[in-house]
Image (cartoon, rainbow, N blue to C red):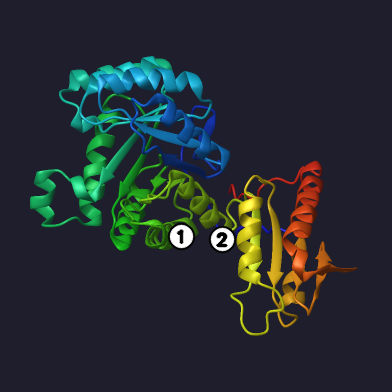
Amino acid sequence: MQTESPITRRESTRINVGNVPIGAGAPIAVQSMTNTSTTDVDATVAQINRIVAVGGEIVRVSVPTMDAAEAFKVIRERVNVPLVADIHFDYRIALKVAEYGADCLRINPGNIGNMERVKAVVDSAKDKNIPIRIGVNAGSLEKDLQEKYGEPTPEALVESAMRHVDILDKLNFDQFKVSVKASDVFLAVGAYRLLAKQIKQPLHLGITEAGGFRAGAVKSAVGLGMLLAEGIGDTIRISLAADPVEEIKVGFDILKSLRIRSRGINFIACPTCSRQEFDVIATVNALEERLEDIVTPMDVSLIGCVVNGPGEAEVSDLGLTGARNMSGFYLDGKRQKERLPNDQLVEILEQKIRAKAAQLSAENRIPTQNID
């Protein structure tokens, strides 16, 4: 029972990162970055596969050395997801990974030397149809901009970004996206708002160095939520000091909460109180873990009592309202004669949710997306 998002997306141009369309109304892509040593090919491939298994659509891989570039070649051959090669300063690495099949280059043109070197990278990107991501970070602004503004400001981040954009414009290259990240929510949001008015290219959103899992997820949800609600953003990455798999999960949860995209189960659960007739927290946690593989969008409400339970169940694909010993069960918003024993809820609900997901999948339900 998904409903469309009221958000109108910012108009932008289209690029493609591998087989993933970005911008111009395409679904907002959720991506992450590996934190393994790139030269450890087996570990990196395993992590990429785990990211993809939970819905990751693009994966960024750091390529700091030529040895890492050679490892990237092998990694590219062993995974199917689009890969962004993250490169700083050395244009030769960019040329090498472009040759080895990178789907996007994360490299700032102004940081790789003279115009001849920049042109070599851009010519390679043109020849192989590879887009570039310009990535500006508040923590690494140019010295002259630090002196000009005194501290990182939205204007400083955007001025830095536009320097790189201008280089690509001079080389007649428009297949790029841009990020202006900061660890401060208001700094990042202000920069993205300014940049959104200056260029038409897609924007990659992120609150960089957001922190550990809990604090980082909250900061990212607040910052990205503000921008996404205004229609700004075409790809997102949740930067957590945690397993990259969690970044994908949080990213989809943010999009789901704004009804921009829906992947998997949206659990509606009460915070619990003394009225609960079954262990709501344990039930939700167990089902979330067991049902991570389901990608079909659906709403499942698990409410511990009959105060709010029926109202939530009536607008869910599947619902449960707590009652003593045997809880009420709803399907497609309708109360069923069947009641579920509270001591067997996890096992029974898993079966029923999987059956409902299979039904919805057969009916070709697709994730809710706003592509205005």
Front one among 327 and 299 = 327
Q: Quadrant of residue 312?
A: bottom right
Q: Is residue 194 left or right of residue 228?
A: left
**Outermost residue toward the front?**
343
Q: Which mark is residue 257?
A: 2
Disc 2 or 1, which lies upstream in sequence? 1
Front one among 152 and 240 = 240
Cα distance between the residues tagged 2 and 1:
9 Å
Q: Is residue 327 left or right of residue 111?
A: right
Q: Residue at x 43, y 44 (%)?
A: 244
Q: Secondary structure at mark 2?
A: helix
Q: Quadrant of residue 315?
A: bottom right
Q: Amino acid at mark 1?
A: Gly
On the image, the x and y values in percent for residue 48 come to 47, 34
Q: Which mark is residue 225?
A: 1
On the image, the x and y values in percent for residue 357 come to 76, 49
Contact? badges 2 and 1 (CB < 8 Å): yes
On the image, the x and y values in percent for residue 170 come to 26, 27
Label 1 Cα neighbours within 10 Å, binned few <14 / some 14-19 / many ≥20: some
**Outermost residue toward the right?**
337
Q: Is residue 48 above or below residue 224?
A: above
